[in-house]
Image (tube, helix red, strand yellow):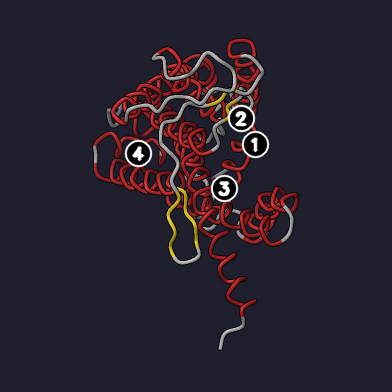
Amino acid sequence: MVPVASVDFTSQLLQYFANGVAKGSTYALMAVGYTLVYGVLQLINFAHAEVYMLGSHFAYYQAKWGGYLPDEPGAKPESVPILLVGAFIAIAMLACAAVGMLIERVAYRPLRNAGRLAPLITAIGVSLFLQYGGQVVFGTEPKLFPTFVETEVFEIGSVKIPNTNLLIVVTTFVLMLGLTLFVSKTRPGAAMRACSHDMRTAKLMGINVNATISLTFAIGSALAAVAGVLVAMDQPAITPLMGVRIGLKAFVAAVVGGIGSIPGAALGGLVLGVSESVVGGLWDTNYAEAVAFVFLIVVLLLKPSGLLGKATREKV
């Protein structure tokens, strides 16, 4: 006979694991944006977290202008038809892709040959500009996100899984699979891989390097928009500073998994999300906030290239 305490502990652990997979999926979507840009440009795009924030706000204002948010404070938002939800997300993705391409064209392209420090400082500057610009444009008060999906809870044994969590995991899996196939099987994907390997040689071979880099920013930014909308659907309160914490966690996930590797970004996000959920559930949520940085330190000490990254030698 199995002790009741053992069964309860196992159920709790499974519940924390399920919650962590959903959280890790959002980290993974964000981490891919960091890893794509770094793989091609060797640049950490710190403004990526603010593109995530813009994605949720773009979807919010579409619903607001469509009349799906009540004017009376405290009133429950109306449900948005599923076809409109898809359209809102698609438009948010396109808008964020355009923002990502604009950031690359205005802020990073002029500094492409300026060494590594100048683009890094510029990335931090763009991030701060979008954070405080967002507070000016959108206001500082949290906004209640519209009801894109009516909340339901599925029970698998003793594990309860909200449909929003399930949607996050499934969407992340589909997008990751699609991105992997795009990069490995298409001509634009081959151009991205070529630029990542040797940008100068890729240019000599006739690849449009500027267009390829713009495409890289567009794809990463579109995925960040999806992450922003999915998180807002699950935790329906958005602010102009909502990207700060998740952006930092996603960056850590990309480094832990092996920055420059798409599977590494996915693995790093899942490892980080599950670890945070388990630690926060079994011990304390304050400890959970430190998990990301503990993982970062350990991985950098033991395997600096990341879990799935490959060590490279620089010629001098």
Cα–Cα span, label 4 and label 2:
35 Å
Q: Secondary structure at mark 2?
A: loop
- Residue placed at 44% from the left, 23% from the top? 59
Name the quadrant containing residue 172: top left
From the image, which quarter does the N terminus lie in? bottom right
For the residue carrying disc 3, how many other residues have a C-alpha within 10 Å: few (<14), some (14-19), or many (20+)? Answer: many
**Residue 236 vertical position relative to residue 154 in the rendered view, above or below:** above
Q: Amino acid at mark 3?
A: Ala
The residue labelled by disc 1 is 245
Q: Which residue is mark 2?
A: 242
Residue in the foreground of this view, choosing between 34 and 61: 61
Tell me the amino acid under the disc marked 2: Met
| Depth check, front residue: 79 or 270 | 79
Q: Nearer the viewer, mark 2 or mark 3?
A: 2
Mark-to-mark CA distance, 1 and 3:
12 Å
Residue, x 59% and y 36% (percent of image)?
A: 247
Q: Tell me if label 1 and label 2 are in contact, CB under 8 Å.
A: yes
Callout 4 secondary element: helix
Mark 2 closeness class: few <14, some 14–19, many ≥20 residues within 10 Å: many
Question: SS class of the residue under badge 1?
Answer: helix
Q: Which residue was labeled with disc 3?
A: 253
Three-letter code, disc 1: Arg
| Type of the residue with mark 4 | Ala
- Mark 4 or mark 1, earlier in chain: 4
Point out the frontmost of discs 4 and 2: 2
Q: Are marks 2 and 3 in contact (CB under 8 Å)?
A: no
- What is the number of the mark on residue 194? 4
**Residue 175 in view, yes or no:** yes
Label 3 sits on a secondary structure element that is: helix
Task: Please tell me which of labels 2 and 3 falls first in the chain.
Answer: 2
